[in-house]
Amino acid sequence: EAAVRGRVEVDPDRIRNTVGSGDVLLGAFVAATCRGLPARDAFREALACATASACHVGAAEFAPELVAELRPNVQLADL
């Protein structure tokens, strides 16, 4: 598979705390691949989860409803 980069369109004013977002990204990616998602789809899910975490005050916490809201805003591009 090709290398991929991703971004999530989100209002910068929604960002509250980025601590733990990388951990959420990795954990969500591993969980998604364990559920059988292809790597590209797992990365999309992981980006939505990590961004939702950054929008939460607590470190490495997120609301599943926000993940669902952010999913359509994930943009992936091949490198």
Image (tube, grey):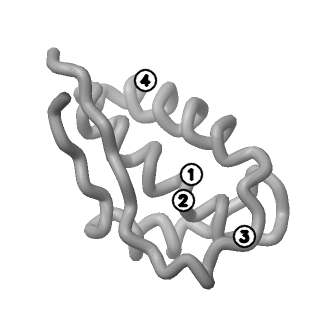
Task: Please identify the quarter of the rendering in which residue 78 is found.
Answer: top left
Q: Nearer the viewer, mark 4 or mark 1?
A: 1
Whether the residues at callouts 4 and 1 have beta carbons within 8 Å, the answer is no
Q: Secondary structure at mark 4?
A: helix
Q: Amino acid at mark 1?
A: Ala
Q: Which callout, 3 or 2, points at the residue further toward the start of the chain?
A: 2
Residue wearing tag 2 = 51
- Across and down, in percent, residue 27 comes to 60, 33
Residue 42 placement, left or right of 25: left
Whether the residues at callouts 4 and 3 have beta carbons within 8 Å, the answer is no
Q: CA distance from mark 3 to mark 2?
A: 9 Å
Comparing 6 with 48, the one in front is 6
Q: Secondary structure at mark 1?
A: helix
Which residue is located at x 46 percent, y 43 percent?
A: 46
- Across and down, in percent, residue 68 comes to 40, 69
**Residue density around tag 1, few if under 14, some if 14–19, many if 20 or more, within 10 Å:** many
Q: Is residue 13 above or below residue 17?
A: below
- Across and down, in percent, residue 76 comes to 23, 46
Q: CA distance from mark 2 to mark 4?
A: 21 Å
**Residue density around tag 4, few if under 14, some if 14–19, many if 20 or more, within 10 Å:** few
Query: Which mark is on residue 50?
Result: 1
Residue wearing tag 3 = 56
Q: Which callout, 4 or 1, points at the residue further toward the start of the chain?
A: 4
Q: CA distance from mark 4 to mark 1?
A: 18 Å
Whether the residues at callouts 1 and 2 have beta carbons within 8 Å, the answer is yes
Q: Nearer the viewer, mark 2 or mark 4?
A: 2
Task: Please identify the quarter of the rendering in which residue 26 is found.
Answer: top right
Residue wearing tag 4 = 34
